[in-house]
Amino acid sequence: INDAVTIEAFVFKIIKRHFQNHPNYIQLVDLMCETTLQTEMGQLSDTLCDILDLPELTPDRWELIVTYKTSFYSFYLSVAFAM
């Protein structure tokens, strides 16, 4: 967990170093914060599955985990940053 927090801090530092004077700097930081929160909620949903019984692991629950745990930072974030 410590490594993840350190990497996240470096990401914000890099964004600041390279974009602090860009007119969309605040939007970039906000996008990163939003994506980080969504990813953390996906991780939490996945972790909570440890206490569930097998019938409770539904396709809807799987879709929620996949959507929030991986898709936002893997696909959405890079496209949104480019735009």
Image (spheres, rainbow, N blue to C red):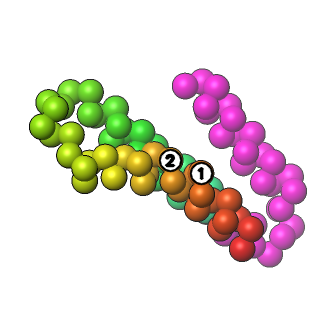
Q: On screen, 7 above or below 26?
A: above
Is 67 one of the magenta-colored residues?
no
As drawn, the residue found furthest toward the top would be 2
Q: Please tell me whether the stretch drawn in magenta is mainly helix, strand or loop.
A: helix
Q: Is residue 27 magenta?
A: yes
Question: Mark 2 is on which residue type?
Answer: Thr
Q: Locate residue 9, reporting x and y percent.
A: 69, 39
Pointer 2 with pointer 1, Cβ within 8 A:
yes
Residue 78 left/right relative to 14: left
- What secondary structure is marked by label 1? helix
Is 26 placed above or below 23 here?
A: above
- The C terminus lies in quadrant: bottom right
In the image, residue 53 lies at what x, y percent? 14, 30
Q: Residues within 10 Å of mark 1 (few under 14, many from 20)?
A: few
Identify the secondary structure beneath mark 2.
helix
Q: Nearer the viewer, residue 34 or 43?
A: 43
Label 1 amino acid? Answer: Ser
Residue at 60%, 24% (x, y): give it: 2
User: Observer-nearest residue: 55 or 76?
Assistant: 55
Residue linked to disc 1: 74
Residue bounds of the magenta highlight: 1-29
Q: Position of residue 76 (x, y in %)?
A: 58, 62
Residue 79: image quadrant is: bottom right
Q: Residue at x 68, y 59 (%)?
A: 78
Is residue 64 shown above or below 43?
A: below
Which residue is located at x 33 percent, y 52 percent?
Answer: 63
| Above-or-below relation of 79 to 65 | below
User: Which residue has dot 2 on it?
Assistant: 70
Q: Is residue 51 left or right of residue 70?
A: left
